[in-house]
Image (cartoon, rainbow, N blue to C red):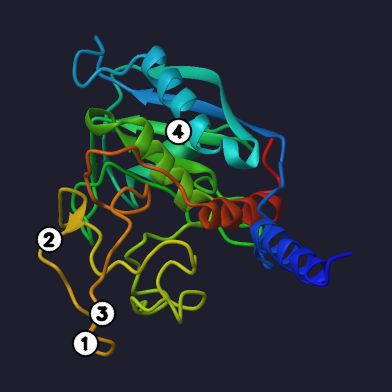
């Protein structure tokens, strides 16, 4: 045996090991969950469905596209019901008021409920979001009406918007998260405890200002002096890039952890 053979084998084993494991807390990046989550859609409409209409085919197509973004952990979503609620007085939803009533009236337990409205009104921080969802964690939440309720605005609904809200539902923060965990440094040294708590999404100072897939204007960290290079094509950012949007492997692993713990009751 060549005297360098043991060293080569050691390096090869180390490379394979580091590739197979991203973060011990999340488990192996090779894991395949083989899980299909059931989805029920509730579309609030006027009598003729003429105001910001939304068809079953549009929802199915969006879900099909979302499934490709979760394929890395062998997870997909299946629309088993599409319900229209005609002439509903709450086609405009005031977050924190109308959503509770809607979810109490129309809900399937232990599945993901999507509620579509013409308008969503939220006083803070975003007055007119395209959607919102309950944040997932490792703890199973109390069985409230809105536990599995995701609210979406019909006029800006897309596969990326749905994937974004499912990201929150399965425990992902925005890439530019600061309030919950503090500001992440562009050095990445504090990536596991600050920002979005995922180490393969670069630090993001604001999540929305980009030109040609780069931050504009450029922002530098006052401590390290390094410039931020945020993940402008990431689904959990607020950028609007001309590129395929994606979840990172670390984000998929974090969601997988939540699926197996805090959302383990789902059918």
In the rendered image, which residue does mark 4 sit on? Answer: 114
Quarter of the rendering containing residue 267: top right
Whole-number angstrom distance, CA of label 1 to CA of label 4 = 42 Å
Apparent side of residue 10 relative to residue 231 in the rendered image (left or right): right
In the rendered image, which residue does mark 2 sit on? Answer: 216
Whole-percent x, y for residue 30 in the image: 70, 48
Whole-percent x, y for residue 3 in the image: 83, 72
Quarter of the rendering containing residue 148: top right
Whole-number angstrom distance, CA of label 3 to CA of label 4 = 41 Å
Check contact, mark 4 vs mark 2: CB within 8 A: no
Mark found first going from the N terminus, 2 or 1: 2
Mark found first going from the N terminus, 4 or 2: 4
Q: Specify the label residue 226 is tagged with.
A: 3
Apparent side of residue 254 relative to residue 61 in the rendered image (left or right): right
Whole-number angstrom distance, CA of label 3 to CA of label 2 = 15 Å
In the rendered image, which residue does mark 1 sit on? Answer: 222
């Amino acid at each position: 045996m060549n005297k360098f053979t043991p060293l080569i084998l050691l390096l090869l084993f180390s490379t394979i090991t580091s590739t197979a494991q991203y973060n011990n807390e999340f488990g192996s990046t090779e894991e395949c969950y083989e899980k299909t989550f059931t989805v029920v859609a509730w579309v609030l409409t006027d009598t003729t469905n003429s105001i910001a209409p939304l068809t079953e085919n549009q929802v199915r197509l969006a879900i099909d596209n979302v499934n490709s973004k979760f394929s890395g952990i062998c997870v997909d979503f299946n629309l088993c019901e599409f319900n229209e609620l005609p002439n509903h007085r709450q086609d405009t939803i005031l977050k924190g008021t109308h959503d509770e009533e809607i979810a109490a009236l129309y809900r399937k337990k232990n599945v993901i409920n999507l509620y579509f409205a013409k308008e969503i009104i939220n006083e803070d921080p975003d007055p007119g979001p395209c959607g919102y969802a309950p944040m997932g964690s490792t703890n199973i939440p109390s069985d409230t009406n809105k536990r599995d309720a995701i609210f979406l605005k019909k006029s800006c609904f897309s596969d990326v918007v749905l994937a974004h809200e499912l990201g929150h539902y399965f425990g992902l923060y925005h890439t530019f998260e600061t309030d919950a965990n503090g500001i992440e440094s562009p050095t990445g040294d504090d990536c596991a405890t600050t920002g979005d708590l995922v180490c393969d999404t670069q630090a993001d100072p604001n999540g929305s200002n980009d030109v040609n897939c780069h931050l504009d204007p450029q922002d530098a960290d006052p401590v390290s002096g390094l410039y931020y290079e945020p993940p402008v094509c990431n689904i959990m950012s607020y950028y609007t890039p001309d590129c395929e949007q994606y979840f990172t492997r670390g984000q998929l692993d974090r969601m997988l952890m939540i699926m197996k713990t805090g959302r383990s009751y789902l059918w």
